Structure formats: structure tokens, C-alpha cells
Image: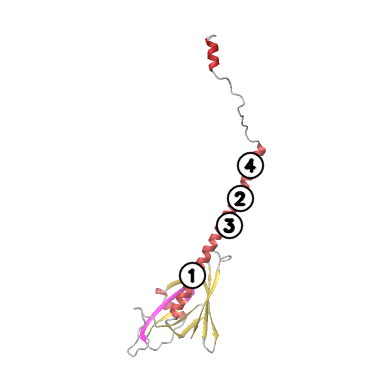
Amino acid sequence: MSLNSVLKSLVPGPRRGRLRWRGLTLVETLFSMALLGIIMLGVYATLTLTLRYQSGLADSVETFGQALLATQKLTQALGTGAQSSLVVDPGVGLAFVSAASPTGPYQLDASGTLEYQKFVVFYLEDGRLYRGELDFPPTTVPPPTPTVANLRTDTAANRLSVAEGVVSMEVTTLDTTDSVVNLKLTVQSQADRTNGTTLETGISFRI
């Protein structure tokens, strides 16, 4: 046996049965792209709906929070006031005499009679509910309450923003015999006036 024949026997020959891959045809490529587009469109629609739901939920929670805040602040303030001193400017606001003391607890005179300390005004402006206070010398007899417009001007420098999105304030008498008054607030979301959340909250009290 020659050397060349030995060397040839050691070198493997060409492999048979190897798989041969071919590329996609134009029709297959277009079909794949169309299928991928449909899948991506479905994913986009799902994400859009999810984001809208989350946004709407957050908007509702925020609106509810503002309505609750406005109701709590009004209830607390009215609870410290001489409700017979209530003055109402329809659609704008209300004012009354309050016995709330700057130092915290109520103050009584030497005879144990409650002393009134200040005027309190709540009013609407640019979709916000504001509160203003105007102090006067302590007295056991509530002084006449100024108009909402005058108190609004006099307290403009130290007013506080109570709640956002308050678009209306209505005061109506429910029972003329017992002097029961209902205060209704309408609170609307700030994000979308068309499809946003709108809540109505109310307070009933005697004057």
C-alpha cells in the first residue's frame, strides 16, 4: 500500500445528509410582518386601555379626596361658629362669626360665657375653595357679619386654599320651621372636564 493511499484513507470524505436551509420567500415575509403587526396592535390596545383605567381611577380618587377635604373643613369651621350669624352670597360663598380661638381651645369670659373671636369666610374662585379669617376683639355677643364680598377683600392677603375642583356651592333651606340649611358642593376632576369625575357632597345644619 502506498503512502498516498494511506493518507487518503485517514482524511474523511464529504458528509452526506447535511440539512440545507433556505430563506423565506417574499410572500412568507409579508405574511410574517402582517401577523407581527396584528400582535403589536393588540398589545398597544391593551396597554392603552390599562393606562386609561389607571388614569381614571387615580382621577376619581383625587376628586373624592378633594370633596372629602372641603366637607371636613366646612364642617369643622361651622361647628365653631354662631350659625345664626350666617351670611350667604349665592354661588360665591358664605361667612359667619366663629368662636375658634387662635390659641386652640374656646375661650370663656369671667361669667363662663363663650367668647367669639373672628369672622370666617369660605368662597369660590377659579375652581378652588378658599378660606379667610378676620379677627376682632373677643366678645360674647356675635357682631353683625359683613358681606362675603367685603370679607373676601379684607382677607385676601392671608387666605388659604382649602380644596381644588370645587365648581359650585349652593345653600338651600330644607325646613323653614326648624331652620335647617343644606350646603351642597360640586367637585369636578381637574384632568378632563368632559369625561372626568364629578361628585356632589352636602352638609346640613341648623341656624
Quarter of the image with the N terminus in it:
top right
**CA separation in Å, label 3 and label 2:** 12 Å
N-terminal-most mark, 2 or 1: 2
Pinpoint residue 67: horizontal percent, then vertical percent.
Answer: 50, 71
N-terminal-most mark, 3 or 2: 2
Residue named by callout 3: 49
**CA separation in Å, label 1 and label 4:** 51 Å
**CA separation in Å, label 4 and label 3:** 26 Å
Mark 3: which secondary structure?
A: helix
Pinpoint residue 168: horizontal percent, then vertical percent.
Answer: 53, 74
Callout 2 touching callout 1 (CB < 8 Å):
no
Q: Residues within 10 Å of mark 1 (few under 14, many from 20)?
A: many
Q: Residues within 10 Å of mark 4 (few under 14, many from 20)?
A: few
User: Over which residues does the magenta segment extend?
Assistant: 123-139
Residue 18: quarter of image: top right
Comparing marks 1 and 4, which lies closer to the viewer?
Answer: 4
Q: Nearer the viewer, residue 158 or 205?
A: 205
The residue type indicated by label 4 comes to Ser
**CA separation in Å, label 3 and label 1:** 26 Å
